[in-house]
Image (spheres, grey):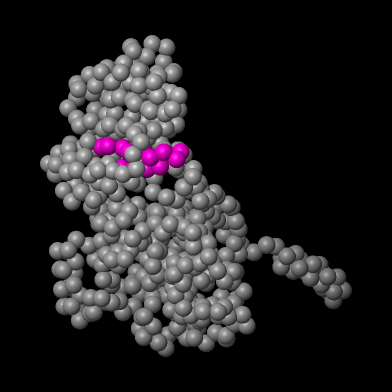
Amino acid sequence: MNSEVSQRFIPMRFTILLFILSLPAFSANLTLQSRAPSGKATLVQESWLPSRTAIIVCDMWDLHTCKNAVTREGEMAPRMNQVLTKARQDGILIIHAPSSCMAAYEGTPARERAKSTPTATRLPDKISDWCKQIPSEERAIYPLDQSDGGNDDEPEKHAAWVKVLEGQGRNPKGPWLKQIDVLTIDQTQDAISDSGVEIWNLLESRNIDNVILMGVHTNMCVAGRPFGLRQMAKNGKHVVLMRDMTDTMYNPACWPFVSHTRGTELFIQHVEKHICPTITSDQFLGGKPFTFSDATAKNRLHILLLGDSTTEAKIPRMSAPEAPQFEDMLRILLAAQSTLPFCDVYNEGQSGEYIRRLLDTRYDKAVKRKPQADYIFIRYGLNDMARLKDWKTEFPKDFRELLRSRRRNSSRFLTSPHVIWRNLKKAQTCSTTAATYSPRSQRISARLPRPIFTLEPIQKSSCSITDSTESLATCLAGRVIVIQISLAMTSSQTKPPNG
């Protein structure tokens, strides 16, 4: 009787087993971010099987030539280790790739795991080489000048760091010996390699299609090494960068003269446009993406641009979205002045805008949530004339309200007090209007001590540069607009209001 019952349940057990095997494996739900050439971000939801996924940890060395880079890596490493621990628990392969440090790991199970993996049937050409560019990048404007090596240490600080490295018997130009100890290496599961061939063999032997890159530095090793983003992308792997688990080698004293943090953002945007999508660590751990502290940040002036289409410069943005825009050119021009600190310029100009609409609809988003501005360039008037019923009365009132709102935040103003728009049929009309507008606006501006920011479209193809006035040329609808910025800033004048 028991034998009959057992035989009766054998088909049922087999059916249950087949059902269990048919259930989908655990999958990681990820949000991939990529960008159009215009810079607009696109988000795509995907589910990745852990068994078909690997994480490559690039060059998270114990020490680096740049002290600031070591500081930032030390901040990031604990969060990165949490990501690796969670990914490992979920069944994702972890590949540690501290380049030029394999001697520290010879004979370990993780190193032998990579070395002993059979050669892949499909081994891409030049997979053992650096890759400095892929076809999708050929027409792109490279976002950073890293020709100086990207070291952002102050000279005195760097000289002291060199002495520390020499005191430890290390080569200051290449002091790394192993991966940073904060990152756990599980010798029973992980792999260690800095070889493009070995890492490709690991991926192919396990049918891994999805690859996550993290580590340093994105604009150099993470993107370019034989196991980096470009090689993975061009050879058919579904690769992403974990954008909050990386850093760049970028010196803010080099083009485009942005902060180190902004430089990293610009290169990540380049990656999202031309190489591969990105994800963030909170998709594994919850909470918020990782951000660096201000420990290595340098003091910079913050300049905010407010105005209409003459400030937004919409046509250049549409025709050449990757080229330096108005705010970029202003920042670059100011960086050329050795007596001035470096600046961050935020452009909140918007076509069709007038002061009343700014105050009523988007002031909080456009102004309040930005870093406190040391200087604000204000450029309004054209649309106010068309929109306000009693322009002569309402415009000065709105202007004062805008100035008072920012004055409470200790910002300094550089106002554009008049409008002159010489443009074919409308030339006479605009010149007449300017005569009415200019004196009133000047009186408003005169009530607060500040320099004057004047923008005057004129038919010129060259710019003259003097000590106190800089000329900035940009092309707008086939015409050259020369923007003369009478800053007259000295080193003492450009200190933030709060010291």
Where residue 4 sits: x, y (%)?
A: 87, 74
Foreground pick, 17 / 110: 110
Identify whether 277 is placed above or below 115.
Answer: above
Check the picture and name the quadrant holding the N terminus.
bottom right
Foreground pick, 41 / 61: 41
Image: magenta residue range: 472-485
- Using residue 390 as the reference point, say whether residue 463 is left or right of it: left
Q: Can residue 322 be seen in this view?
A: yes
Residue 483 counted in the magenta span? yes
Check the picture and name the quadrant holding the C terminus.
top left
- Using residue 44 as the reference point, say whether residue 431 is left or right of it: left
Foreground pick, 24 / 407: 407
Q: Which residue shows up at 34% across the image and 34% down it?
A: 458
Where residue 170 sits: x, y (%)?
A: 23, 79
Q: Which residue shows up at 51% across the image and 51% down it?
A: 37
Q: Which residue shows up at 36% across the image and 80% down it?
A: 100
Q: Which residue shows up at 81% across the image and 72% down it?
A: 10
- Using residue 290 as the reference point, say whether residue 28 is left or right of it: right
